[in-house]
Amino acid sequence: MTGQPPAPVDTDGDGIENSADQCPDTPTGVSVDLNGCPAANPPPEVGEHYGPDCINCHTLEATEVHASLHYQWQGDAPYMVNGGSPQGKLTNSVNSYCINILGNWQGCSGCHIGKGAMPEPVATQEQLENIDCLKCHSQGGVQPTRVECLACHATAGGGDAVKRGDLALATGTTADYGYDIHMATTGADLQCQNCHTTENHRIAGKGSDLRATDLDVNVDCANCHGSSPHSESTLDQHTLQVACQSCHIPIYGKDASDTLATEATETFRTWKTSHAIAPPFHPASEKANDLIPRYRFWNGKSDNYLLGDIAEFDAQTGAYPTSRPIGSVQDGKLYPFKYKIAEQPMTSGSHLLIALDTSVYFSTANPDAAISQGLMNMGMSESTPWEWVLTDTFQALNHQVSQKSKALQCSSCHGSTSRMDLQGELGYGLKGAKSSVCTQCHGSKENKPFQTIHDKHVKDKRYDCSWCHSFSRPERGLRLP
C-alpha cells in the first residue's frame, strides 16, 4: 500500500534488520551481540568447541597467533650470545635430539599449530586460514588446559617425557602430590598460564636451550612466593645467588605413582642404529628415572649452536655443545639442568654438525642415506666426508617441584661433592692456598666445620666474600678488604 514503510530486510540472517545492523557481513549462524556483531569470544557449549572456521569471527586473534613463536617457530633472540635474529626450530636451531627439521617439515610439524603449510612472515589470508585454533583450544573455553599444552610440550623429541626431563603427559592429570606440587590435582592444580602469562597470544617463559623469546616477561618463583619466602634469613640470603629450583627440584625424570607408563627421560641417543622393528625407526636411546641435576651458574643468556656454526669441542665434557647456559659465580644464579648426550654426524675438517634428514631415517633406519640427504639439504655434496661425534646439551629444569620435606638440606650441597662440586667446578674455592688466605688475617687455626667457619666470618665479623674468594657480594653490605 502506498505510504507504508518497506518490510524489514535482514540480508545476512543475523536477526538484525539492515537499517540497525552495524555488522551486516556477520556470517549466518554466528553468535551475535546486540548490534548484530559477532560476540566477543562466545563461550562454547559444554563438550563442544569452536568449529574449523574460527577466523570468520576471530581475525584479530588469528593475526596475533600468526605473529607468535608458536606459529612462526622462530623469533627475536635477545638472550642468545651467538647469531642475530630471528632464530628458531623452523630454520637454524640445532639440538641433541632430532638435530634440525630440515627435510622433514611434514613429520616435525605434527606439533605446529597450523594445518600443514609452512609458516610465512606475512599474514596473508591463506596463512591465517592455515592456523588450527583447535590445537590449543580443543577442550572448549578461552584458556587452553594443561592437557592441551602437554600434547606437544611433553612429547617433544620423539615421545612422552623424552626431551625436557621435567614434563610428561602425566603432568596434565596426575594426582600424585610428590610428582609435582604445582601441577598435581591434589596440589596447587595450576594451569600452565598461571606462570606462563600470555599477551596477545604470545607466551612468557623459556628455557636455556630455547633460542627465541615470545613474550619478554620474567617467569619467576617470586611472582607468587615473594622475594623472601623463608623465615630463616640464611635461606633467604641464598635466593640471591641460588635459584629456588636448585633446592626444590632435587631429582627429575620422576615417575608419577598413578600412571601405568614410565616418565623416564632420555639421557643418550645414537643415530648409528635403531631398536625399532617397524617404521617409524627412531634412533636407539637410553632413558632413566630419578636423575640428579647438573648445576651451573646462569645469568639468563645462552650460547646455543645454530645450523652452519663451526662446532667447538668442550674438553670438560668431552663433547660438542648444542646448548650452554652462560654465567659464573660472579654474575649468575645457580640453576639445575638436565644433561643429555647424543651421537650425531659432523663434517670432517669443517666441523659442521649435519642435520641428517629424519624423514629418510624414520622410514629406512639407514643413517648413511639420511646423512647424504641431509648434506644435500644443507647445500653440500652428498659425498662430503663426515664422522660420528658426541654432542651434549644443558636444559633448565623448572617443573616437577617436590614437596617441602624433599627439598635439599644444607649438607646436600655443602657436606660433600656427590651432588655438586662447589669449591671446584662451580667456583666457590678459596682465591689461593688455604695457608695464605687464612694467614692474611691471623695465624694458623684448628680445622673446624665449614658452617662454623663461614658463620664466624660472615655473621660475626661481617666480612665480604672477597676476603677469601675471587668474587664479591656487595649487595649484602658486608665489610670489604
Image: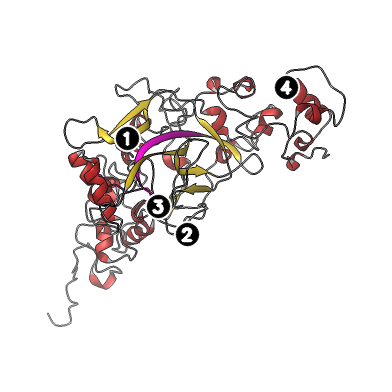
Q: Secondary structure at mark 1?
A: strand
Q: Specify the quadrant of the image occupied by residue 404.
A: top right
472 left or right of 85 in image: right
Q: Position of residue 342 (x, y in %)?
A: 37, 36
> What colour-coding does the image apply?
secondary structure
Residue found at the far left of this picture: 1
Q: Verify whether residue 352 appears in magenta.
A: yes
Q: Does 274 lie within the magenta span?
A: no
Q: Nearer the viewer, residue 150 or 58?
A: 150
Callout 4 secondary element = helix
Q: CA distance from mark 3 to mark 4?
A: 51 Å
Residue 195 in the image: state x and y as whole percent: 48, 41
For marks 1 and 3, the one nearer the N-term is 1
Q: Earlier in the sequence, mark 4 or mark 2?
A: 2
Report the residue marked by disc 2: 84
Q: Which mark is residue 270?
A: 1
The answer to which of marks 2 and 3 sits earlier in the sequence is 2
Q: Which mark is residue 451?
A: 4
What's the amino acid at mark 3? Ser
Location of residue 281 (image quadrant): top left
Amino acid under label 1?
Answer: Thr
Q: What's under tag 2, amino acid-wise?
A: Gly
Residue 148 x, y percent position in the rendering: 32, 40
Which segment is the magenta one? 337-359
Seen in the picture, residue 393 relative to 249 is either above or below; the reply is below
Q: What is the distance, in whole Å, between disc 2 and disc 3 at their CAs?
A: 22 Å
Q: Quadrant of the C terminus?
A: top right
